[in-house]
């Protein structure tokens, strides 16, 4: 199944070029929670129940053209956004060879197994319909297309052989980066610098996430094109690695790293990102209000 969020928090069941509004399926989420609220995503934690209710509502839900909808992130409240740096060999090589990418930061010149994973602020999350709002326009802002996946149940110290049981589904991720000398979590966490979409494809539809073509164009020009079989650490290994340090919860988002070809974007650009078996999302690049007011 493919679930999207659109408009004012509506829930949609994606079928080809149309969306069935199954917002009523959210009633399957228990309403027993009071403050302090849980620090995980309730939709993802109850995805099976919501999916069952969505199937029941499908036939009576009128189809809506997906092109006319403002698509939000399919996950509203992740506890963590976990990102994998230099997780493609050719990207690791281009980072080492290009001072504009590594800024003489020794951490960027090492392997993922040495430097580990990093976290992005959850406030950086946005959907493709909301667009990217660039800050620090006097500095280089880069695009990075990635396979993203979402954790479906709580787990800790998960061995790789069991890791795929913890995946709720997959989406396309855009990890936007301000180049500079600061810590990467800081430079990758402005609002809208983590785009997730266009929808969540449940894990049963993608039995092998390690063999997916992915690409990105900017204004029609191909910038990145690769396959997830070029990742250094695959989905299962990333889950094992991350959960050896902290507990994973429903709704936690993984950005699995980007292939070679990262390059600069600017206000007015149009990004089209594609991942095989997931789909394509179109994202408009704008200047953030603070950035445009300061220029």
Image (cartoon, grey):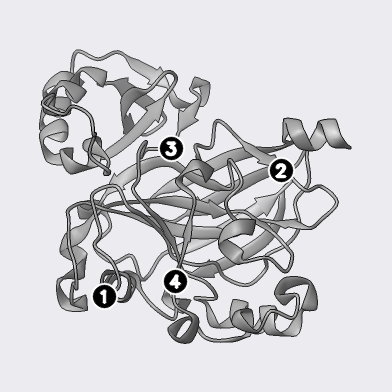
Disc nearest the viewer among 3 and 2: 2
CA distance separating discs 3 and 1: 27 Å
Location of residue 63 in the rendering, given as x and y in whole percent from the top left corner: 33, 17
Q: Which of 276 and 173 is in front in this view?
A: 173
Badge 1 marks a residue whose secondary structure is loop
Residue 73, numbered label: 3
In the structure shown, which secondary structural element does the residue marked by tag 3 occupy?
loop
Q: Name the outermost residue toward the right.
A: 295
Q: Residue 291 carries which label?
A: none
The percent coordinates of residue 197 (x first, y second) are 45, 42
- For the C terminus, give its image quadrant: top right
Mark 2 surroundings within 10 Å by alpha-carbon count, few (fewer than 14), some (14 through 19), many (20 or more): many
Instruction: Return the disc, 4 or 2, that comes first in the chain's sequence.
Output: 4
Q: Mark 1 points at which residue?
A: 244
Picture quadrant where residue 287 is located: top right
Q: Distance between the residues labelled 1 and 4?
A: 11 Å
Counting residues from the start of the chain, the first of labels 4 and 3 encountered is: 3
Mark 4 vs mark 2, CA separation in Å: 24 Å
Viewer-side label of 2, 1: 1
Q: Name the residue under label 4.
A: 117
| Rendered-image quadrant of the N terminus | top left
The tag earlier along the polypeptide, 1 or 4, is 4
């Amino acid at each position: 199944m493919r679930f999207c969020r659109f408009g004012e928090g509506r829930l949609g069941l994606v079928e080809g070029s149309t969306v069935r509004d199954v917002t009523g399926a959210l009633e399957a989420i228990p309403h027993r929670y009071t403050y302090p609220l849980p620090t995980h995503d309730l939709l993802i934690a109850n995805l099976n129940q919501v999916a069952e209710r969505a199937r029941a509502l499908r036939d009576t839900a009128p189809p809506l053209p997906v092109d006319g909808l403002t698509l939000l992130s399919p996950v509203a409240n992740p506890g963590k956004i976990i990102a994998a740096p230099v997780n493609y060999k050719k990207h690791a090589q281009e980072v080492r060879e290009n001072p504009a990418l590594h800024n003489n930061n020794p951490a960027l010149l090492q392997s993922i197994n040495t430097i580990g994973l990093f976290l992005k602020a959850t406030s950086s999350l946005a959907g493709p319909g909301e667009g990217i709002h660039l800050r620090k326009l006097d500095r280089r802002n880069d695009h990075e297309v990635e396979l993203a996946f979402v954790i479906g149940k709580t787990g800790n110290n998960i061995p790789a052989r069991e890791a795929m049981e913890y995946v709720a589904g997959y989406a396309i991720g855009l990890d936007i980066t301000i180049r500079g000398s600061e810590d990467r979590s800081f430079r990758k966490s402005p609002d809208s610098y983590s785009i997730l979409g266009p929808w969540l494809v449940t894990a049963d539809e993608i039995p092998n996430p390690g063999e997916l073509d992915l690409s990105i164009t900017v204004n029609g020009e191909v910038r990145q094109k690769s396959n997830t079989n070029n990742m250094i650490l695959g989905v299962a290994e990333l889950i094992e690695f991350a959960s050896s340090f902290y507990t994973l919860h429903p709704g936690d988002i993984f950005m699995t790293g980007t292939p070679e070809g990262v390059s600069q974007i600017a206000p007015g650009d149009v990004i089209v990102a594609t991942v095989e078996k997931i789909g394509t999302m179109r994202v408009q690049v704008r200047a953030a209000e603070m950035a445009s007011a300061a220029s």
